[in-house]
Image (cartoon, helix red, strand yellow):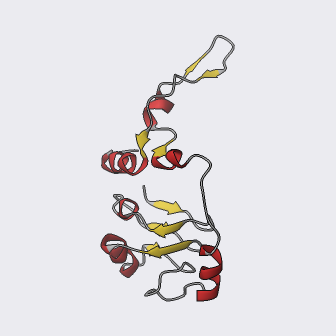
């Protein structure tokens, strides 16, 4: 993966190191979210101008949101309707490749496999040679 833009999504917490370890990454945009920390691999990408973390809540980075804006965002309790779903990737390349068409041309989906942990799935795709 070369380009990934996740800006303006109200994402928060620590930037996952797995994102910053993707092979061939030339532009990762995480701007205008509410991230609070970046790890060592992500910091390397920031220094190389590959990772854009402007307008987040990362205290030691330039061009961040104001303390008041970050405080207002974090003062609201955030929850996910199904927090377990946040740990799984909803689809993968094998699912896409195994789709078949019915007699009337409609694409049939195979039964959903057990979900893979999302960051582990990123690791798996990072190592694949995709065209």
Query: In the image as oriented, which residue stretches furthest toward the right?
Result: 104
Q: Is any part of residue 71 visible from this angle?
A: yes
Q: Compared with residue 79, is residue 57 higher up or lower down, i.e. above or below?
A: below
| Occupied quadrant, residue 45 | bottom left
Query: In the image as oriented, which residue stretches furthest toward the top?
Result: 103
* Residue at x 40% of width, y 63% of height: 16
Q: Compared with residue 1, is residue 52 higher up or lower down, i.e. above or below?
A: below
x then y, percent, for residue 80 = 60, 53
Choose between 108 and 73: the one closer to the eye: 73
Q: Is any part of residue 66 visible from this angle?
A: no
* Residue at x 42% of width, y 66% of height: 26
* Residue at x 48% of width, y 68% of height: 13
Q: Compared with residue 62, is residue 96 higher up or lower down, i.e. above or below?
A: above
Choose between 75 and 53: the one closer to the eye: 75
- On the picture, is 38 further left or further right than 76? left
Pick the quarter of the image with the N terminus. Answer: bottom left
- On the picture, is 123 further left or further right than 52? left
- On the picture, is 108 further left or further right than 24? right
x then y, percent, for residue 43 = 35, 77
The mark tally for this picture is 0
Pick the quarter of the image with the C terminus. Answer: top left
Q: Compared with residue 39, is residue 64 higher up or lower down, i.e. above or below?
A: below
x then y, percent, for residue 56 = 55, 78
x then y, percent, for residue 88 = 47, 44
């Amino acid at each position: 993966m070369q380009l990934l833009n996740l800006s303006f999504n109200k994402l928060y917490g620590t930037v996952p190191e797995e994102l910053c370890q993707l092979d061939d990454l030339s532009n990762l945009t995480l701007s205008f979210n509410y991230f609070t920390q970046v790890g060592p691999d992500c910091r390397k990408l920031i220094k190389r101008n590959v990772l854009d973390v402007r307008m987040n809540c990362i205290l030691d980075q330039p061009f961040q949101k104001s303390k008041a804006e970050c405080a207002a965002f974090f003062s609201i309790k955030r929850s996910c309707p199904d927090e377990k779903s946040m740990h799984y990737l909803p689809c993968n390349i094998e699912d896409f490749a195994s789709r078949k068409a019915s007699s009337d041309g409609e694409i049939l989906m195979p039964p959903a496999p057990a979900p893979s942990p999302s960051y582990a799935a990123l690791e798996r795709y990072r190592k694949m040679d995709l065209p």
